[in-house]
Amino acid sequence: MTKVASSVDLDARFAVSEHVHCRRFDDEVVVLDLQSGDYFALNETAARIWEGLTGGRSPREMVAEIAGDSEEDVERVAGDCVAFVSRLLDEGWVTLR
Amino acid sequence: MEWDSVVAMRADRDGRITRLEPAPSASPVIASKVAQATARAFACRMSGGLAIHASAVARDGVAIACLGDSGAGKSTAARELCGRADLQLLADDVLGVRRDAGIWRAHPTEQIHWIFDGADVKRAFPARSPATGPARLSRAVLLRFDEACVSPRLRPLRGSEAFQGLLEGSLRFDRSIPACREEIDMLADLAAAVPFDELSRARGTPCSEVADRLAALLEGRGDVE
């Protein structure tokens, strides 16, 4: 099991919040907060995680997939993924299912 | 809809303005600008289009739009272009765009150029040749200043960059979530359908040089670097 110090449950499932909308453009995904007007462009890896999580997959599954494809260290990928998911939860862009 | 102490407007569900009445106490300059541009762009939005902070000109039914921050040169570029043969003013500051039968068209909103007279006051200059109908939007250009540019420089904006450029320039009248979703999807479709470039130049670059580049783009002579 991957050891990552975080408050994010690696087996959790997420849903896109009602006030959030996203659009894909080639390798990037733009996520828009319709309440605040803020928006962010996600790079290729972040976009992949976003689409995986909001498509019903868990952080653990996404970490395994990305680490497998990139041959990067699993703990490093997990750390990045957890930080990203924490940000999504803090911003209120996703909710736990 | 009413802009407090400025102008009252009524439009039908197809976006046709049926009443446009300046308030008695309104500044004639502000009332005229709101009545002409914002109200017509709002009507365009109400009829399923978008309202964008942009100037635009057209020739032979084909339009080019200029976006950018306030002071970026949108109005100046439009006026310079409209001083040339056959070019018509569609918008000085606020443009309505709508997809009709799969084609994005720019709809005329203004017949007046609003240009700073050297101080902080904008003066109205009636357009020599205002457009009387919509034109196919063939190109959008984001104007900006960059002191490192020796001459005007074009850079294509594609994908999320184009979308973000349009998003920054869109005017929102309805902040409900369904309306925002609809607008964002339309902006994304517009970004995918219409080529969008960034035109950078140093301050002090002659207006004619900027207009030359824009006119070339309008004629389909895209020389993006």
Image (cartoon, coloured by chain):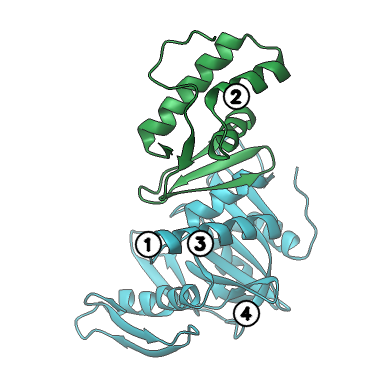
Chain colours: A green, B cyan
List the residue tagged with mark 4: B134
| Same chain assignment for discs 3 and 2 | no
Q: What residue type is labelled 1?
A: Ser
Mark in front: 1 vs 4: 1
Are there few (<14), some (14-19), or many (20+) residues within 10 Å of tag 2?
some
List the residue tagged with mark 3: B183
- In the displayed structure, A34 sits above or below B88; it is above
Q: Mark 1 lies on which chain?
A: B
Q: Which amino acid does label 4 sit on?
A: Pro
The answer to whether the residue labelled 3 contacts the one labelled 1, judged by CB atoms less than 8 Å apart, is no
How many tags in the picture?
4
The answer to whether the residue labelled 2 contacts the one labelled 4, judged by CB atoms less than 8 Å apart, is no
The Cα–Cα distance between marks 1 and 4, rounded to whole angstroms, is: 28 Å
| Same chain assignment for discs 2 and 4 | no
Q: Which chain carries label 3?
A: B
The Cα–Cα distance between marks 1 and 2, rounded to whole angstroms, is: 35 Å
The Cα–Cα distance between marks 3 and 2, rounded to whole angstroms, is: 34 Å
| Same chain assignment for discs 1 and 2 | no
For the residue pair B49 and A72, the one nearer the viewer reads as A72
List the residue tagged with mark 2: A61
| Same chain assignment for discs 3 and 4 | yes
Mark sitting earlier along the chain (1/4) = 4
Q: What residue type is labelled 3?
A: Glu
B184 to the left or right of B26: right
List the residue tagged with mark 1: B176
Mark in front: 3 vs 4: 3
SS at circle 2:
helix
